[in-house]
Structure formats: C-alpha cells, structure tokens
Amino acid sequence: MARSQGNAPGAGENRPWTDSLQRGRVPGPRLPQQRVVDGTGPSTRSVHAGTYEDPITGAVGTPVFQSTTFTFTEDTYQAFDQGHIRDVPIYGRYGSPNQWSVQEKIASLENAESALMFSSGMAAITTTLLALTNRGGHIVSSRDVYGGTFNLLREDMHQLGRSVTFTDPTDMAAIRAAVRDDTQVLFFETLTNPLLKAVPLVELGELARERGLLLVVDNTFLSPVHLRPLEHGAHLVIHSATKYLNGHSDVTAGVVAGTRKYVDRIWSQLLKFGGSLDAMMCFLLERGLKTLALRMRRHSENSTALAAFLAEHSAIRAVHHPSRPEYPYRWLHDICPDGWGGMVAFELHGGDEAALKLLDRLELPVVATSLGGVESLVSLPFNTSHSFLTARQRREVGIEPGLVRFSAGIEDPDDLLADLDQALSGL
Ligand SMILES: *Cc1c(COP(=O)(O)O)cnc(C)c1O
C-alpha cells in the first residue's frame, strides 16, 4: 500500500480535540470488488482506481447502483454493533457503492486514506469547516478564497460561534501573526482565483504542526495531477469536483480527502447536514475522472501557450500565470513543477471597456462563469465574481481595470491563439 500513513499533528500545546479520536486506520470505505492500483502513475489511477468489478456480469465499468437502501446482512449488524457503519452499504446518504468507487479514485489520486463525496464544493467546505471547529474556535483564512467560501466565513461562521481572521495568503508572517491560542483550522486555496496566488504550503504545514492546528486546503485550481497537498503538509484537501475533477461542466459535486480519522469525523457531520452525492452523479463524475490526467496536461499546455502569447501582445499590460518569469510565488514551482491547470488572468491596457469588447469579439470561448471544463470559458471579475466590491476595493485585492479571467479548455492551442489574436487586434 503506497498510502500516506496519516498526518496527525505532532505534540503541541494546543492539540485539536480531533486528536483524541481513536479510529481504525483502514483505508476506504471500499468493497472487496473495487480495484486498488496504488503505486501506479496518475493516468493509471485516473482510469482504474476504485472501479467496481461486477463479479456476475463482468461489466468493465462501475454499474450504477440506483438504490437508496441496502439489504441488512450479518455484516450490517456487526458494523452497527462495532461502530463502523461507514464501511457497509446501509443507506444512500451514509454511503453507496457508487460513492465509494469515485471516492476511492480521488483518494488514490490525492494519496489519501479516505475521501468523501458531497453534492457540491460548498457542501464539502461548509461540512468540513464545521466538523473540524467548535464554538469559540478560530479560523485563519484569506480574502482571496472563492466567493461562496468568503461569504460563509464572513457571514455565517460568526453566527455559529467561530471567529475568522483574513490574511494575505502569500504572507507567512501575517498568517503566523494571525494564529491565536483558540485557532483550530488554517483554510487556504492552493492557487487562488483569479490572480493565481500560490500559498506557501510547506511552511503552512510546518506552522500547523508547530501549533497543533489542522491545515485544510482547497485544491480545485490545480487538481491532484499537478499538486497533492497531503504530501506537503496539509491534513485535508477539498475540491469543487464541479471543475477539473469532473471536467465536462455537467456535474455539481465536492469532495474532501485525508486520513480516515478526520474524514470519518467529517462524514458524521455530513450525515446531519445531508449534502451527499447521488449515485448517478457519482457515475458521471467517475467517468469524467478517467481522463483527468490527460485533460490536465492539455489544460496546462494551453494556458501556458496563451500566457506566452499574451505576454508579447501590445494590448496586454500584465499576465498572471505561474509559467511567466515575473510570477512572484516561486515556492509553487518546488512542489508543483510541471503544470498549473488551465487558468490564466490578464489585464488589458484599455481597461474594463476594452475587456468587454474583447468578450464580444471572442468566438471560441464561452462567456460564462466556472472553470475546469473541456471548453474554454472567459469572464471578467469586475462585473461577476468581484462585482460586490467598489472599484477601489477591487484594486486593493489586486483586481485591476481590464482584468480578464480565462479558463483554457482542451481545444487545439492554435485555434485558441488565433481567436484571441483576431479578438485583440484593433482593440
Ligand atoms: C467553484 C468553487 C467552489 C465551489 O464549488 P461548487 O461545486 O460550485 O459548490 C469552491 N472553491 C473553489 C476554488 C471553486 O472554484
């Protein structure tokens, strides 16, 4: 088993209460029929890990178990008796063969003991943060997180008795200074929207261990093909599976992965909050995941080619992409050397007016929010994700006039470049 054997925080003054949980350290949940392909590369894991091999029909792919409840057996009663009901099929919200297949695939890709599916990325984030903190607890996070997450942290956490400090996610000194005696969780995105700021993940992991905190990261923008945060000090990794993991802009889902100790705790919160994922969505997500490694390579090649082209173009003032020599967060390259997904952001000299014109003139990319699909998507932060801010507040968080957010799909790079070229000419 090439699984990480857990990331329990070392001895610290302020150990989280979750440390006292004595859970069995079996990976899974997993059925005996599911394929395990640890020790293989990311493409092999994408294709094979977790597949349920039906012993009766020999079906090559995981069948859809469209059933909300499962017949009680001796195993079920034993599981109730021994308190490991997460490991047997009982009821759809508790777990199902389709959830377990897709969970196993993602756990394998993230090199985690266990993963847990949710009905959206926000369900994963909300359930995880509330499972890992308690009343009076404190969270350190950043203003650069996804809008839904920011609203949860800013509006709801206070109501629920948790306090939150927002810091610059790239400033380790500021993050250190924000940690208090009552801090329980550090929550950051590995690569942020839309400016692709990278968090100093390794240093955050060290801080978490030093102070007995849990480091939870949202790795949506990079996917486990480019970065596996659990290997660099994170305790838990979250994805909006709606984006790259599914990859086809047709499923809303979320996931958290880590050691069973923590994922089991989050599972018991999921049972109450109820954001579980339906069997059919699991099937679609499992199918999408089979091409994850292939897709990520193309997304990354395309965004890198676009960044290089844009950096040379006279209509462009700045390009934000980890491949550019002026990219400031160099620590990303140490842990994530050969690909950064499909996102690229750039600023037009002509400001928001020119950016609006560009969107009108582009023919290939779809003008829509979201990211990570096979089709290129383009949008402007100023009138979408960051429209609730004033122009001055936008500048304070680095959203300059004329900023365009481009999610490169997997189209032929020459076609994307030609389209951008025609749309930019004469702006
Ligand atoms: C989209 C997104 C989310 C929210 O995911 P949903 O599946 O839409 O609920 C969370 N974090 C990041 C980084 C995202 O891009």
Image: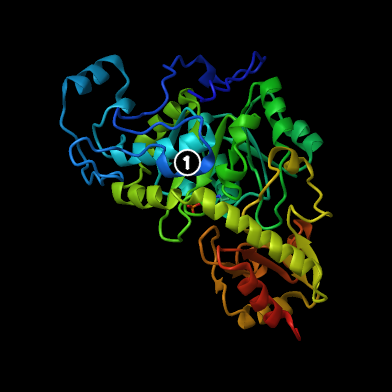
- Residue at screen point 56% across, 46% down: 223
Which image quadrant for residue 186?
A: top right
Q: Is residue 161 visible?
A: no
Foreground pick, 413 / 329: 413
Where is residue 307? Give x, y as percent.
73, 63
Q: Is residue 118 visible?
A: yes
Q: Estimate how packed mark 1 is, as few (under 14), some (14 to 19) or many (20 or more) residues with alpha carbons within 10 Å.
A: some
Q: Which quarter of the figure is the C terminus placed in?
A: bottom right
- Residue at screen point 72% across, 50% down: 197
Judge from the rendering whether residue 345 lies leftward or rightward of residue 279; answer left or right. Answer: right
Where is residue 314? Give x, y as percent.
83, 76
Which image quadrant for residue 36?
A: top left
Where is residue 267? Give x, y as percent.
40, 32
- Residue at screen point 67% across, 26% down: 208
For mark 1, give the secondary structure: helix
Foreground pick, 62 / 217: 62
Q: Amino acid at mark 1?
A: Thr
- Residue identified by numbered label 1: 44
